[in-house]
Amino acid sequence: MKKMILSLGIISVLIACGDSGQAKKEEPKVEDITQNPDYQKGLSLLAGSDCLTCHKVDEGITGPSYKEVANKYPNADEATIKDLAGKIIKGGSGVYGTAIMTPHPAITEEDAIAMVKYILLLK
């Protein structure tokens, strides 16, 4: 009888200390940015431009990498996006050293905004 009571006591303690599954942390959901329409449109526009001559996603060549740009503007609002699109069209310099970004006057503002939105998704 003592053995049975002792066994039941040990089983009770083990059940009380066991993992009920509720303490497990949920894995954070990772957004698949490749399904974002801004990603798809911007990627298509950049692929058809000369931008990849000076920029890569993870590597700066003459200009900064796209990830570096995205990390510089983590909370970009519409005004910042429009300003960055203007830099694509008009060119610029001084933000990432002495390299000069050549102007791209043939790119429309709408397309430049789409390119910027794609770049900002890469953070």
Image (cartoon, rainbow, N blue to C red):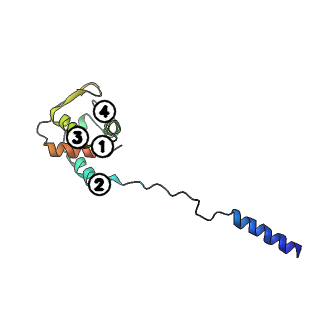
Q: Which sits earlier in the primary sequence, circle 3 or circle 2?
A: 2
Q: Answer few, some or many: residues within 10 Å of disc 4's Cα (few below 14, many 20 plus, some between 14 and 19).
A: some
Q: Which three-letter amino acid code belongs to the residue tagged 2?
A: Asn
Alpha carbon separation for disc pair 3 and 2: 21 Å
Given residues 53 and 27, the one toward you in this image is 27
Q: Which sits earlier in the primary sequence, circle 4 or circle 1?
A: 4
Q: Answer few, some or many: residues within 10 Å of disc 1's Cα (few below 14, many 20 plus, some between 14 and 19).
A: many
On residue 41, which mark appears?
Answer: none
Which residue position holds label 1?
A: 120
Q: Is residue 73 visible?
A: yes
* Closer to the eye: label 4 or 3: 3
Say what secondary structure mark 1 lies in.
Answer: helix
Q: Is residue 101 left or right of residue 22?
A: left
Q: Is residue 60 left or right of residue 20?
A: left
Which residue position holds label 3?
A: 79
Q: Name the spot of residue 7 as percent of width and height, x first.
A: 81, 71
Alpha carbon separation for disc pair 4 and 1: 13 Å
Alpha carbon separation for disc pair 1 and 2: 12 Å
Q: Which sits earlier in the primary sequence, circle 1 or circle 2?
A: 2
Q: Which sits earlier in the primary sequence, circle 2 or circle 4?
A: 2
Which residue position holds label 2?
A: 36
Say what secondary structure mark 3 lies in.
Answer: helix
Q: Which sits earlier in the primary sequence, circle 4 or circle 3?
A: 4
Image quadrant of residue 89?
top left
Q: Which three-letter amino acid code belongs to the residue tagged 1?
A: Leu
Which residue position holds label 4?
A: 64
Q: Is residue 47 visible?
A: no
Q: Are marks 4 and 3 in contact (CB under 8 Å)?
A: no
Alpha carbon separation for disc pair 4 and 3: 21 Å
**Residue occupying the far left of the picture:** 106
Q: Which three-letter amino acid code belongs to the residue tagged 4?
A: Pro
